[in-house]
Image (cartoon, helix red, strand yellow):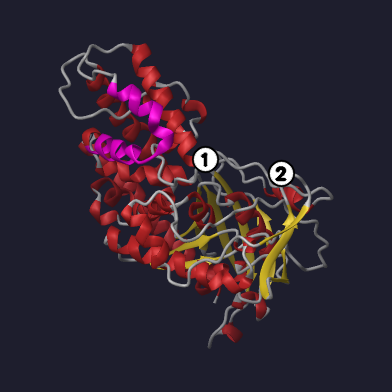
Amino acid sequence: MVIGAISDTLGRSVESVGSVLSETFFEPVIRLGVTGLSRAGKTVFITSLVANLLDRGRMPGLQAASSGRIQAAFLQPQPDDTVPRFDYETHLAALTGRAPHWPESTRAVSELRLSLRVQPSGLLSGLSGPRTVHIDIVDYPGEWLLDLSLLDQSYDQWSADTLSRAEARDPARQFRALIDATDGSAALDEPTAQALARSFTAYLVEAREQGFSDCTPGRFLLPGELEGSPALTFAPLPAGEAPRGSLRREMVRRYEAYKAQVVKPFFRTHFARIDRQVVLVDALGAIHSGPQAVEDLRRAMAGILGAFRPGRNSFLSAIMGRRVEKILFAATKADHLHHSQHPRLTAIMEALLRDARDRADFAGAKTQAMALAALRATVEETRSHDGKALDLVRGTLLDTGKQAALHPGELPEDPGHLLAPARKGETAWLDADYSVMRFAPAELTLKPGEGPPHIRLDRAAEFLLGDKLA
């Protein structure tokens, strides 16, 4: 095992050195990880980002595009032959066709390579010709990223934390009742173990539907080929005795198998090679769901930042050949608000990120919070109501197909007015109500050279990629 570990480490070191030499002397490669929490619009973000890098008429905030230094952009076969290709063309057709609709969410890892031919800037720009920069976009579920926290936790620690969160969540009622009626020290009975796992999974699914972000283990929500396997047939149990052959002893074994056989391979294969990271967050959905959902989002963001601290975890220290350089936390669906409220949404995201940094004791990468809409589905208008001007957004309702104008409620100017009740465990907002409507994508008529309309996608690209395109 020691020889195998040394060989594995040397292999990764050689691969890392080779990657550095290739990027220095040949064509640089940027691996951009994109993940999202609870219906944050990951597929739409990637599709619109690629479309707007191919046709850059709406990207003034990306300096390499506005200056004309990006001379060409084109899709190429991805380097990883064993990873499914992100189905860009199908998703773009869904968003821009005659009957536009939101594309199906991806449920596993996928990848896409976009290559840019860029004229360098600076003193040596006139002495060298254009170079090619490859952007490998790695799409993976946010639930899997949150699983990294399990690597630092024993079964007892994970169970205590999970059951503590479940006490405040209404969807966990039936699961909590089943746990109370279960004797973990009794002999293992497979139907009992399966019933616990099914109830636990049903609770996680419903909690996610109600806007909660931290719903680990992530593969319980997206099992794929592992559905029904012992590695996904466990549940948290209260602390107690675990004699040989008991239900609790088997729960511990399966939990450890999940970490070793599911979590670690994902991070070794995909996560450890990422240079830049986007984490998409449906902050408006969490606010609409109430203080508990906002507090849960705050905890989830701290857990995500913890995933980028390889020095703390011995497993990560071994697999991380390089450190993630930049992380963008983006509040999506900014088009659901009038632009006058965008600074308030950004301030809420910045407050959540600042608090997450403190909780995670994080350092190393540059982080930024931003409010954006990868695809703008609404238009703005102002109406008079009770003698006052009321800022609205108008769009096509997803459920009915009818046009509607919405005023979702004023976000507070001070983010503390949301975060304080969330920390205190309040069950509802005391002085305000925040509504959310689901809009369908609008019909588009794009001019030559224009990508789909968006809000601040160009600024997101500048933060994530701008320095590599200089």
- How far is disc 1 from disc 2 in space, using C-alphas? 17 Å
Location of residue 470 in the rendering, given as x and y in whole percent from the top left corner: 54, 77
Occupied quadrant, residue 415:
bottom left
Name the element at disc 1.
Answer: helix
Seen as rendered, the residue at the extreme front is 386
Occupied quadrant, residue 275:
bottom left
Q: Residues within 10 Å of mark 2 (few under 14, many from 20)?
A: few
Residue range of the region highlighted in magenta in the rendering: 157-180
Disc with the residue nearer the chain's start (1 vs 2): 1
Magenta includes 175? Answer: yes
Q: Do the residues under discs 1 and 2 have CB atoms within 8 angstroms?
A: no
User: What amino acid type is highlighted by mark number 2?
Assistant: Asp
Occupied quadrant, residue 148:
top left
Q: Residues within 10 Å of mark 1 (few under 14, many from 20)?
A: some
Asked whether residue 448 is in view, the answer is yes
Q: Is residue 406 left or right of residue 410?
A: right
> Which is more toward the observer, 308 or 335?
335
- The dominant secondary structure in magenta is helix
Residue at 23 percent across and 11 percent down: it is 187
Q: Is residue 407 left or right of residue 219?
A: right
Asked whether residue 324 is in view, the answer is no
Location of residue 427 in the rendering, given as x and y in whole percent from the top left corner: 40, 48
Q: Look at the image and tell me in which quarter the N terminus lies.
A: top left
Q: Which mark is residue 209?
A: 1
Name the element at disc 2.
Answer: loop
User: What amino acid type is highlighted by mark number 1?
Assistant: Glu
Residue at 78 percent across and 68 percent down: it is 449
Q: Quickly name the residue at label 2.
A: 399
Location of residue 446 in the rendering, given as x and y in whole percent from the top left corner: 81, 64
Residue at 80 percent across and 59 percent down: it is 444
